[in-house]
Amino acid sequence: MANPGVDSLDGKSLFLEGLQPVQIETILAAAKPLHFREQSVITREGSQANQFFLLTKGRARYFLNTPDGRKVLLMWISPGEVFGGAAFSGRPWHYMVSTEAVQDCTVYAWDRATVRNLARRFPRLLENALLIASEYFQWYVDTHITLISRSAPQRLAQVLFHLSHRLGRRVTGGVELEVTNEDLANTANITPFTASRLLGRWQRSGLVRKHRGRVLVHSPDQLLDHALSASSV
Amino acid sequence: MANPGVDSLDGKSLFLEGLQPVQIETILAAAKPLHFREQSVITREGSQANQFFLLTKGRARYFLNTPDGRKVLLMWISPGEVFGGAAFSGRPWHYMVSTEAVQDCTVYAWDRATVRNLARRFPRLLENALLIASEYFQWYVDTHITLISRSAPQRLAQVLFHLSHRLGRRVTGGVELEVTNEDLANTANITPFTASRLLGRWQRSGLVRKHRGRVLVHSPDQLLDHALSASSV
DNA sequence: CGCATTGTTGACAAAGTTCAATTTGCGTGG
DNA sequence: CCACGCAAATTGAACTTTGTCAACAATGCG
């Protein structure tokens, strides 16, 4: 079996930080390498948390469904990062959010019992998990504040800013993002209509350039400044 | 010094769950008992996370300040619960949210180094911390969903519902809450004006009874049902 | 009793959403 | 290589919800 091996992560996993290569070998050896197709849902909010994952290749993201049937996009997951944490924690038996593969994904998957065993053997994993948990918490604090104290344009600008750093492809004349208006809207919690109008306005101001399923942000910082200062326009 | 002792918690602390009484003695012996006056701020968002706390008596709550100067109320903290988790976790050196005493509070306080040491000696503490972290996360997921998919009346009803269970004093004819309209508004993320209007409406429908600094909810469930179903009125 | 805090009410404004009608861009298969 | 068809994006106009502000009323503490 083509095992991705330790090296494929470049040692860049916060989850495995501080562990010896031998220990990492042991930990990874206990996992099943799995593959997920683009678009496939990996964990489903509310379903039994039976597996814990480490993404080695591809791109995934967390999302939620609202009671009124809309979809909300949360954090992105990059190689080296773990997800499905509910399976790692002692009590919660259900995933709290859903996860989907945005590109084809390669992961290590541990089942619940295995990963809990590993946590007992290597408490450093617990440490690291706690650290990751606090990153999530910080993300949510930020998101919460943004949601209740920023306007639609400011939220959208913030989203573009974040995505530029996380997913942006640097091209001549700025940073290019492969996202649809709908994705942006679902991340910023606005409607696609509002997103379209705002992007149009910013395009007219020369801050961005729109294409179908793609946005070119000339300068993320400038855009954010613009939105945070300018009351209108 | 009047040390509260293990018993004052009734063994009801999730943080200390699964540890032997002897171990708990050790852990508590490493803490300083402290007292905080009603209204005093215990941790401040953004400031150095030097201490980790276990509340033994009184009532506290988390809050945040928005960039535009408003105050947002988050979770309540009851005896047996811990707060100031940033001091417990490896990396974040700053508190992510603020904490204030709503009533006079008695706490155990560990300084950062001490509690990190204890975590190394008793990995079960890490386990428990992780469990608590996932409770926080779940709270935030719920709050987030509520915030983006519920109307102002629904959010206020939800807040009243939650508070009824967490802080409610059972009296004849319902559950009584000691909260101001402003507190309710800051929890539900609406303005005090909207809160006043909604409560007035619900009083007229016989769902609640208002007093200065106090609300009597006749039936939390009924109120929530009402708000979630009724589109208007 | 007086005063500060808390709550109320109305008129109005603003920000976003909704919906329907179109248009645009892009990959595919003939 | 072109035309078809679908998904994505656009635009305007009406509408809803909630916030804003100012004036005022009530509550209860000292």
Image (spheres, coloured by chain):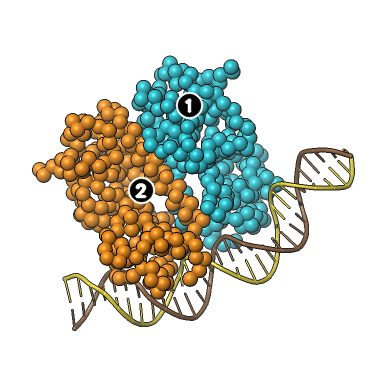
Chain colours: A cyan, B orange, C brown, D yellow
Name the residue at 18% across, 30% down. Answer: B22
Q: Position of residue A107 (x, y in %)?
A: 54, 28
- What is the quadrant of the N terminus of chain B in the image? top left
**Is residue A18 rendered to the left or right of residue B87?**
right
**Is residue A73 rendered to the left or right of residue A113?**
right
Name the residue at 48% across, 26% down. Answer: A110
Circle 2 crowding by C-alpha within 10 Å: few under 14, some 14–19, many from 20: many
Q: Which residue is mark 2?
A: B97
Vertical relation: D14 (above or below) A49: below
Name the residue at 35% across, 51% down. Answer: B75
Amino acid found under the numbered disc labelled 2: Val
Q: Position of residue A126 (x, y in %)?
A: 37, 30
Q: Secondary structure at mark 1?
A: strand
Q: Which residue is mark 1?
A: A110
Vertical relation: A18 (above or below) A224: above
Circle 1 crowding by C-alpha within 10 Å: few under 14, some 14–19, many from 20: many
Q: Residue under mark 2: which chain is it in?
A: B
**The image quarter in which residue C14 lies:** bottom right
Q: Gap between marks 1 and 2, in whole Å?
A: 33 Å
Q: Position of residue B189 (x, y in %)?
A: 42, 59
**Discs 1, 2 touching: Cβ within 8 Å:** no
- Say if residue A7 shows up in the picture: no
Amino acid found under the numbered disc labelled 1: Trp
Q: Nearer the viewer, residue A220 or B167?
A: B167
Name the residue at 65% across, 55% down. Answer: A196
Give residue B58's mark. none
Q: Nearer the viewer, residue A202 or B71?
A: B71
Vertical relation: A217 (above or below) A111: below
Q: Residue under mark 1: which chain is it in?
A: A
Does label 2 lie on the same chain as label 1?
A: no
Q: Secondary structure at mark 2?
A: loop
